[in-house]
Amino acid sequence: MPSGDHTAVTAIRGAMLTFTGDPFAQPVRDVRRYESDAIVLMADGRIVDCGPAADVAARVPAGTPVTHYPNALISAGFIDAHVHYPQLPVIGAGGKPLLEWLTAYTFPAEARFGDIDYARPIAARYVAENLRNGITTAAVFGTVHRASVDALFEEAERHDLRIICGKVLMDRHAPAELLDTAERGYDEGKSLIERWHGRGRLSYAITPRFAATSTPEQLELAGTLWRETPGAYLQSHVAENADEVSWIASLYPSHARYLDVYAHHGLLGRRAVYAHGIHLDDADFESLHVSGTALAHCPTSNNFLGSGLFSLHRARSEQRPVRVGLGTDLGGGTSFSMLRTMQAASEVAHLGGHPLSPSRAWWLATRGGAEALDVDDRVGTLAPGYEADVVVLDLASTPLIEFRMRYAADIDDVLAVQFALGDDRAVRATYVAGGLAWDRDATPRM
Ligand code: GUN
Ligand code: ZN
């Protein structure tokens, strides 16, 4: 697969969609930018110009080839706010609820990642699938083993992909081969931070799996390490499943609510990202809002594991909006495709009585995800100065989609059709830092 050549000037042409603001907070027409025929010009890893082809064409440097993608939509690359790359070997296993699924499939799968030679090909497959699906930024869980993080960061660096990752912290309630200790977790995190954090497009995330698998001592040291590391992330899980919530209540009897356990240990704030958040109430959303903590909404996982219906409507309430991104949550989630994930989010919103507009879903997968991960000044938007992470979607990737698109009424209808019927086949090309990283029609199938 070609890696990005940052010095080259790259120009692509097609329809273009991006957002300049939050369509949950403002009328969508004020924040959605759609051009039916646009040129996006990239150089030195960044977008240097974009807009109507009729205007931009005159500014394209002489001799620069313009790659034309007919019947395609150019968007900011997708952002996966929560995923476990070591779980790729068990995607789709189960039909069990969360805690049984963890014991039966997930922990045995993760136990093998102490061996970097085992981890490397899985990390490579994970990165390749991201590119095939137009995902250009992701917040990723490793396993408890340092080697799991080394393997992913090595591979991400090779592709100049924007990746947030950390070793999982787990010092109880898991098989012995998956446990660290509070101190060892801190020390290993520190050494991974020294090696990787802030190197190119890589950032470290302190990653306590969830409050059930960490002692209070480990949560305390996780908070210490987070505060000591400027720009680092904190990622975990919260309130995914009813049995999990009861278990947390029994493990932490002095805390009235699950989220308080994390708050008490200093684990809320900007660049903290919690997956799921299904069983939260308005007081929890208020403290997420006030602290700037983000949630990753993982609808294919929540459906697959029968976890429940996340209320995006309540989380994004105009009075106290919580930052929300979309997560694939593989391997609890069932698809790498952010189109499938947007479709699942739409269906869950509908079941909850508050339908999600296609434009809002698209924002969640792009600029909203960037806000959730605190990288919205760099990615998630197509505009000059932003890093040139771009996905090009073929709007007629199957015979049925091609047929249905002839009847598309407007851009919202186009988007709705793409995620109702589309998947990885729709990703015509992915550009990472201005370089062509995936070309569906040129690369032999892996
Ligand atoms: N809660 C704790 N660990 C996990 C995990 O690996 N996946 C999901 N979906 N939830 C979790
Ligand atoms: Zn998860």
Image: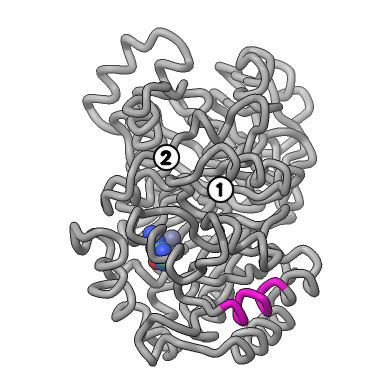
Within the displayed image, which quadrant is ligand 2 positioned in?
A: bottom left
Q: Give whichever of 129, 444 is nearer the camera.
A: 129
Label 2: how many Cα within 10 Å (few below 14, some 14–19, many 20+): many
**Above or below: residue 104 compared with residue 46:** below
Q: Name which quarter of the figure residue 345 lies in.
A: top left
Q: Which percent across, then down, holds residue 111?
A: 36, 84
Amino acid, disc 2: Phe
Q: Which percent across, then down, holds residue 301?
A: 34, 51
Amino acid, disc 1: Leu
Going 52% across and 64% down the picture, which residue do you hit?
A: 140
Q: Name which quarter of the figure residue 410 lies in.
A: top left
The C terminus sits in image quarter: bottom left
Looking at the rendered structure, the number of numbered marks drawn on it comes to: 2
Extent of the magenta region:
216-223
**Residue 246 relative to residue 295: left or right:** left
Label 2: element kind:
loop
Res 286 seen here = yes
Label 1: how many Cα within 10 Å (few below 14, some 14–19, many 20+): many
According to the picture, the residue beneath numbered tag 1 turns out to be 295
Q: Give whichever of 319, 178 is nearer the camera.
A: 319
According to the picture, the residue beneath numbered tag 2 turns out to be 310
**Residue 194 relative to residue 165: left or right:** right
Can you name the residue that lies furthest to the left here?
95
Q: Give whichever of 14, 312 is nearer the camera.
A: 312
